[in-house]
């Protein structure tokens, strides 16, 4: 029947297939009815099915090893230990799931397809002249490192940190060496423009450093044509620069005047723009540069004080001159706010003790009480605004105490004026009691007695 054939060909475990032809009787059929197989036959069938499954599994996992099993699960050739045994599985280094990538093991050495053991040093491979790929011209090749020219984005990312670091150390030689290592290509004219753009947003000392940098880079890294091209781009970009820096036209004009004075721009650069400028900002910059050059009278020297006084890079003698000039202007104007602004523009907070020293010496050398009162007012204002710290104020007074003997040679009344000024400073809260008590007093001469023969004795109060 149809059901009987389905059972036969579906591998039912409790039925055995009729292997005889039609019309022949078997042990499993009585009067046309199928009977169950004996228990021993079922056990043999299970063993054969298990052996076949194991054979298929091992053949797919151990393909290429040369090992195979027969139907009776006996190894035909290869290892004497069946892979299914515990010892075979222990020595088998392949994946149990059969999912290996086929790559060599990590850290392997001296095998085909591996890099070698760690720390192994390889000798130089000798060139085989008989090699079909041998090329005689390759032995005479010279290999050099090729640096690609910078693009606009790479230029900004690379050069901007160099300029910003220069504002901190002020070494133009280091900037020149770093720029030489770069392949600027057509971006040479962008270096002055980038430096000036950063300086416009900075302080007066950074603008002074920028002018020094442009003067030193010219003829070393840049040419005069690169500088002129850079200033041409700056004049065209002034409408955009004014949005961030309202005083950009005047500052760019000062850069142009300084460049002409430093001889990195031709003297006819400003004349070449006459009648050719439509932008009002560019006209203002060129007019500013022309006025500064006329004030300099074309001497070819650097225009001093163009950017004001700022930065600790200046010599000490020049800083002392600037402090004296600031004090003289204050004595004429009497405006402490303007004096504070000028002192901040110096950007030398570590040198404020010199300002205090020069102010007190100016009081000692002056005549009249006005100078004493106006300088006392200035020091009190600067002390209250914390522009001059307590330490700098103390150092300034102590320097005057140390030099009072020499000052007294030129100013005979220096001791009395100093005592008056120190007492007023203590009353105004500028100095403390210890600093007031440390003020030196002048020695007074008097006759000791009539029996001393007119000798004078020095008495120190």
Image: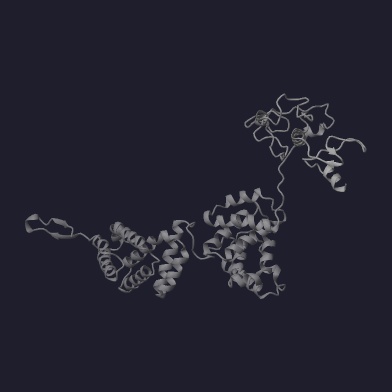
In what quadrant of the picture does the C terminus appear? bottom left
Residue 268 can be seen in this image: no
Structure colour scheme: one colour
Image check: 454 left or right of 301? Answer: left
Image check: 11 left or right of 254? Answer: right
Residue 401 can be seen in this image: yes
Image check: 301 left or right of 325? Answer: right
What residue appears at the point 34 percent right and 70 percent down from the top-left corner? 380
Counting labels gives: 0
Image vertical order of residue 328 relative to residue 447, above or below? below
Residue nearest the observer in this picture, 62 or 293: 62
Residue nearest the observer in this picture, 49 or 254: 49
Residue nearest the observer in this picture, 26 or 206: 26
Q: Quadrant of residue 37?
A: top right
Q: Quadrant of residue 394?
A: bottom left
Q: Residue furthest left?
A: 451
Image vertical order of residue 42 relative to residue 347, above or below? above
Residue nearest the observer in this picture, 384 or 127: 127
Q: Position of residue 82 (x, y in %)?
A: 71, 28
Image vertical order of residue 45 relative to residue 280, above or below? above
What residue appears at the point 54 percent right and 61 percent down from the top-left corner? 206
Q: Position of residue 294 (x, y in %)?
A: 59, 69
Q: Position of residue 421 (x, y in %)?
A: 28, 68
Q: Residue furthest front?
A: 31
Q: Position of residue 146 (x, y in %)?
A: 72, 45
Image check: 345 left or right of 239? Answer: left
What residue appears at the point 86 percent right and 35 percent down from the top-left corner? 26
Q: Quadrant of residue 306?
A: bottom right
What residue appears at the point 52 percent right and 62 percent down from the top-left corner? 205
């Amino acid at each position: 029947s149809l059901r009987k054939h389905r059972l036969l060909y579906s591998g039912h475990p409790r039925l055995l297939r009729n292997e005889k032809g039609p019309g022949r009787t078997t042990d499993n059929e009585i009067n046309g009815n199928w009977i169950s197989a004996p228990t021993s036959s079922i056990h043999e069938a299970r063993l054969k099915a298990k052996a076949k499954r194991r054979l298929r599994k091992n053949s797919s996992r151990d393909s290429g090893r040369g090992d195979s099993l027969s139907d009776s699960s006996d190894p035909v050739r290869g290892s004497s230990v069946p892979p299914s045994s515990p010892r075979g599985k222990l020595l088998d280094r392949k994946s149990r799931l059969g999912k290996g990538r086929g790559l060599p093991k990590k850290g392997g050495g001296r095998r085909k397809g591996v890099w070698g053991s760690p720390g192994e040093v390889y000798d130089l491979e000798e060139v085989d002249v008989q090699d079909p790929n041998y090329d005689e011209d390759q032995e005479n090749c010279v290999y050099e490192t090729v640096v690609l020219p910078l693009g606009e984005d790479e230029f900004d990312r690379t050069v901007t940190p160099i300029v910003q670091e220069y504002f901190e150390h002020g070494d133009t030689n280091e900037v020149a060496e770093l720029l030489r290592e770069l392949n600027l290509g057509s971006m040479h004219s962008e270096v002055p423009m980038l430096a000036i753009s950063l300086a416009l947003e900075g302080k007066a000392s950074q603008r002074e450093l920028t002018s020094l940098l442009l003067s030193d880079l010219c003829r070393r890294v840049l040419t005069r044509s690169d500088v002129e091209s850079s200033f041409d781009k700056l004049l065209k970009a002034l409408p955009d620069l004014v949005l961030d820096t309202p005083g950009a036209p005047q500052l760019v004009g000062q850069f142009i005047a300084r460049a002409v004075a430093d001889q990195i721009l031709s003297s006819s650069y400003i004349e070449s723009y006459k009648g050719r400028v439509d932008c009002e900002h560019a006209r203002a910059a060129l007019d500013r540069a022309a006025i500064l050059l006329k004030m300099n009278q074309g001497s070819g020297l650097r225009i001093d004080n163009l950017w004001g006084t700022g930065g600790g890079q200046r010599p000490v003698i020049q800083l002392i001159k600037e402090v004296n000039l600031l004090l003289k202007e204050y004595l004429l104007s009497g405006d402490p706010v303007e004096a504070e602004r000028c002192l901040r523009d110096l950007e030398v907070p570590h040198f404020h003790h010199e300002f205090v020293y020069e102010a007190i010496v100016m009081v000692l050398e002056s005549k009249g009480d006005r100078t004493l009162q106006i300088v006392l007012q200035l020091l009190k204002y600067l002390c209250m605004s914390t522009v001059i710290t307590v330490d700098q104020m103390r150092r300034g007074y102590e320097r005057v105490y140390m030099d009072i003997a020499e000052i007294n040679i030129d100013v005979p009344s220096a001791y009395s004026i100093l005592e008056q000024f120190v007492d007023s400073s203590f009353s105004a809260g500028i100095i403390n009691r210890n600093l007031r008590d440390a003020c030196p007093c002048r020695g007074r001469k008097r006759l000791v007695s009539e029996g001393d023969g007119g000798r004078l004795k020095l008495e120190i109060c």
